[in-house]
Amino acid sequence: MSYNEQLNTSKRVLMGPGPSDVHPRVLQAMSTPLIGHLDPEFVQIMDEVKLMVQHTFQTVNYLTFVVSAPGSAGMETCLVNLLEPGDEAVICIHGVFGGRMADIAERCGATVHRIEAPWGEPIDPVQVKKVLENCDPKLVAIVHAETSTGVLQPLDEIGKITKDAGALFVVDAVTSYCGVPVKVDEWGIDAIYSGTQKCLSAPPGLSPVSFSDRAVAAMDFRKTKVQSWFLDLSMIKNYWSGAKRAYHHTAPVSSIFALREAYRIVLEEGLENRFERHYRNHQLLKDELEPLGFEFIVQPKYRLPMLNAVKLPEGINEAEVRRKLLDDYNIEVGGGLGAFAGKIWRVGLMGESSSPNHVHMLSAALKKLI
Amino acid sequence: MSYNEQLNTSKRVLMGPGPSDVHPRVLQAMSTPLIGHLDPEFVQIMDEVKLMVQHTFQTVNYLTFVVSAPGSAGMETCLVNLLEPGDEAVICIHGVFGGRMADIAERCGATVHRIEAPWGEPIDPVQVKKVLENCDPKLVAIVHAETSTGVLQPLDEIGKITKDAGALFVVDAVTSYCGVPVKVDEWGIDAIYSGTQKCLSAPPGLSPVSFSDRAVAAMDFRKTKVQSWFLDLSMIKNYWSGAKRAYHHTAPVSSIFALREAYRIVLEEGLENRFERHYRNHQLLKDELEPLGFEFIVQPKYRLPMLNAVKLPEGINEAEVRRKLLDDYNIEVGGGLGAFAGKIWRVGLMGESSSPNHVHMLSAALKKLI
């Protein structure tokens, strides 16, 4: 063990399912000497970050802020604040993260109705409609970009069906956010969470979230306390909003500095340009990998541009090649998760890692290795 | 709103209840380009950090790691993993943070027996003994350093009483850790949590924790799932320990880089030297502030060296002077919390902020202001 030595990491190229590469400006902002979490200057920074979260979620939701913990805590924030024992919840599962939502919803004491699709395929709105005819759920939850399968789930139709059924629409946008359009208001999303380490290209550890007025009203009507103190929005909202900010917990000041800079870079590029860039580099990756014998497992129209799920050419030992990519070329790609473990790769082209140079580095190294 | 401008914060001197000043080495380590959260190099860094957490908690506990969220999430981690509906819990309350533990324990479905002491005083072991004669709790929880009152709670006697009663001993060491001795094994502590932004002088956002084998056994005997997925140790332990690390959530890589460097600085100084330094600067602060008319509210033998709770001289508008300290001298001190709001100051001398220079800057500025 060598903790007596200075930190000495390899210079990796991050092309897995996150974290993605981070712009030097973000690292520099993060290393700014700290200020207090109730300092008037920090409160202003929180307000600025909140505006940028609203802008990137394309929402005017008042209750929009950043959870002081990673994306999975954002997921839990949405579910524990909306669900209480006795509620029904419809959870759509087409990969690992839908399954995680169902697990959390059950821990909230909710009765969960599962709608499943085969891994690699999206959920069919017709199925959602059918299930909603036979139950009365408080919410319908679905993953927009299934990081375990590479599927982009169309949301507008399921959003309408959910609204017609009088349920709240909860969306996981961890991987899609800032890489493809996420239109919270237009799509009728009532609660949404994301992560910072994917297409936003900030370090991991925070979760941007947003809640519609309908969601806030549902929270106001709770009969029981939220089971998590740390994630209880009835308290956190007084730290992130309002004239007098009340202490709840000590915000991760440095991570918020970093996040602010990452958002500034997103807005300088512009959301539409950013989406186009993600799509363009995904096409380039496809053009480079298919001739090498890689197969995309998702149909073209449901393919995520930032998370490319590919089957390897026949006879390749995936773990060995993946390890060589890391050891010999410092390139990280992701292995399969859950049902896909050992069977696929997940190649991330997220945020700063979505560039022609990244694609070229990977394809050139693969030509040497396989 | 000015998010189109580069981050531009004042150079603060942090002498509140945390965050404390951070050493430039820690900021530099934090700004290291990222590596993946499952990268073999990152796994080694986690192992190194774990060893340093054990060393500083003075424990050999196997289940020792860092929660990916601030101290309050560490508190919740301890309580939600140990308590389930129907359990009894004895919670000692001598300030804000004991009250928070009681709130969380109730959210776990536990029946809470409260033992209270007046603000500014420690809990009396005799009281604990009496309460334990009339109930059969799963755990007794207490705050070691009450950040809201400045009280250092002696733990060894209450630890013995708790053990004799067959209950688990849960300790909040958020503010005491790395500033005064915290002897997990010697004092029979079964679950402990801290924060990184106090005497450890790392940025806020993480919570070092440790669990005894007795605590682990109690978790293994749970009848119900832990109500928080994000904080469920039965899953997290497979990410932080064992031969094959299983993905649970994306660890806050950059914050762990920073934490590693902060621990290295603690170990280079040595725990005993660090404790002495905290005590010495506390004495200096006392020598400087008392002649100005400040009064320490806690009896000398229970005074925290790193968090000095003081009444202001008669006739001083505390909020106004505190604001002037910040605006004119860039010095942050903390106001009162809860019952002490508007009545006291909390002057932090924690980690890098525990130095003669810090004391001198504060006392000189105060001489000008009051």
Image (cartoon, coloured by chain):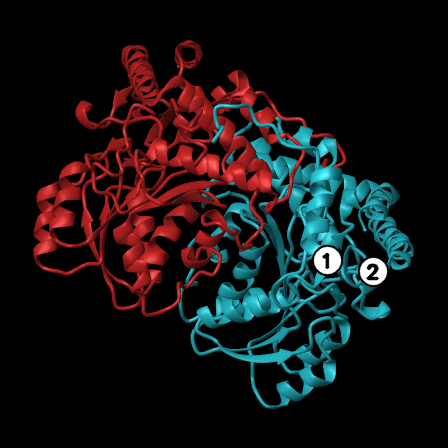
Chain colours: A cyan, B red
Where does the image place residue A216, in percent across and percent down from the top left? 56, 64
Visible residue check, residue B321: no
Q: Nearer the viewer, residue B317 or A55?
A: A55
Residue B310 visible, this orientation:
yes
Q: Position of residue A271 (x, y in %)?
A: 82, 50
- Tell me what residue is drawn at x 36 percent, y 57 percent: B81
Chain bearing mark 2 = A
Q: Tag 2: residue type?
A: Phe
Instruction: Count every numbered label the image shows and give the total.
Output: 2
Q: Which residue is mark 2?
A: A294
Which quadrant holds residue A7?
top right
Tag of residue A345 = 1
| Residue A155 relative to residue A295: left or right | left
- Residue A118 horizontal side relative to residue A246, left or right: right
Few, some or many residues within 10 Å of mark 2 (<14, 14–19, 20+) = some
Q: Is residue B192 above or below residue B12?
A: below
* Residue at the image position 40 percent from the left and 46 percent from the top: B74
Q: Amino acid at mark 1?
A: Trp
Residue B52 position (above or below residue A84): above
- Residues tagged 2 and 1 counted as in contact (Cβ below 8 A): yes
